[in-house]
Image: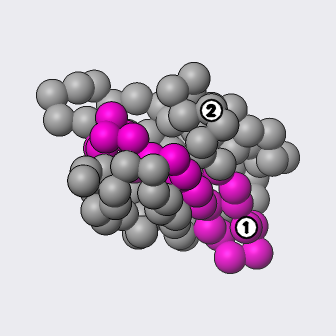
């Protein structure tokens, strides 16, 4: 059973930073591509960033230059460093992976950017 658990969300002022963490269990983590998605109120869930098993990173245009995805295979962790946060970054952020065609999601962590 693959489990993903996120942490690190919260309330931050515009221009601030947060780091989200996701710990994975139940799979050979180092072999998996890992993603961060987000879903804002009334909007569809969108892909924010991906890090492949070999460390290649891909970002949505809306977060390029502000967000950094990274992983620490020794601890089965994936991170999302978010800088220069904007109100439009407010959303629930989800950790995700897909293994043999099955998607696995964490429970989500709320990020709110507001003054």
Identify the residue position indicated by label 2 in the image. 64
Q: Residue at x 62, y 67 (%)?
A: 77
Tag shown at residue 84: none
Instruction: Give the class, few, some or many, for how many residues have Cα within 10 Å of label 2's Cα (few <14, many ≥20).
Output: few
Q: Residue at x 15, y 28 (%)?
A: 42
Please say if the residues under marks 1 and 2 sit with CB atoms less than 8 Å apart. no
Residue 109 on image: x %, y %? 32, 59
Residue 60 on image: x %, y %? 56, 27
In the current view of this chain or complex, which residue is farthest to the bottom?
A: 75
Q: Which residues are magenta?
A: 69-98
Q: Nearer the viewer, residue 90 or 93?
A: 90
Q: Residue at x 42, y 69 (%)?
A: 8
Task: State which tag comes first along the sequence, 1 or 2.
Answer: 2
Residue 2 on image: x %, y %? 48, 61
Question: In the rendered view, would you say 82 is above or below 75?
Answer: above
Callout in the foreground (1, 2):
2
Where does the N terminus fall, quadrant-wise? bottom left
Identify the residue position indicated by label 1 in the image. 72
Q: Secondary structure at mark 1?
A: strand
Horizontal arrangement in the rendering, residue 73 relative to residue 18 (left or right): right
Q: What colour scheme does the image use?
A: one colour
Q: Nearer the viewer, residue 7 or 86?
A: 86
Q: Secondary structure at mark 2?
A: loop
- Quarter of the image where one finds residue 12: bottom left
Magenta segment: does it hold 99? no
Q: Residue at x 48, y 31 (%)?
A: 47
Q: Main secondary structure of the magenta part?
A: strand
Q: Label 1 to label 2, Cα distance in Å?
A: 21 Å
Q: Nearer the viewer, residue 31 or 114?
A: 114
Tell me if residue 109 can be seen: no
Residue 7 on image: x %, y %? 41, 69
Horizontal arrangement in the rendering, residue 77 relative to residue 84 (left or right): right
């Amino acid at each position: 059973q693959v489990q993903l658990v996120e942490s690190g969300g919260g309330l931050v002022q515009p221009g601030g930073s947060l780091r989200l963490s996701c710990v994975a269990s139940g799979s050979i983590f180092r072999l998996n591509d890992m993603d961060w998605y987000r879903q804002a109120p009334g909007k569809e869930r969108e892909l924010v960033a991906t890090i492949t098993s070999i460390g290649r990173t891909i970002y949505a245009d809306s977060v390029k230059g502000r967000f950094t995805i990274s992983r620490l295979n020794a601890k089965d962790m994936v991170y999302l460093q978010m800088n220069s946060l904007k109100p439009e970054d407010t959303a629930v952020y989800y950790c995700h992976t897909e293994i043999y065609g099955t998607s696995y999601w964490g429970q989500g962590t709320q990020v709110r950017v507001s003054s």
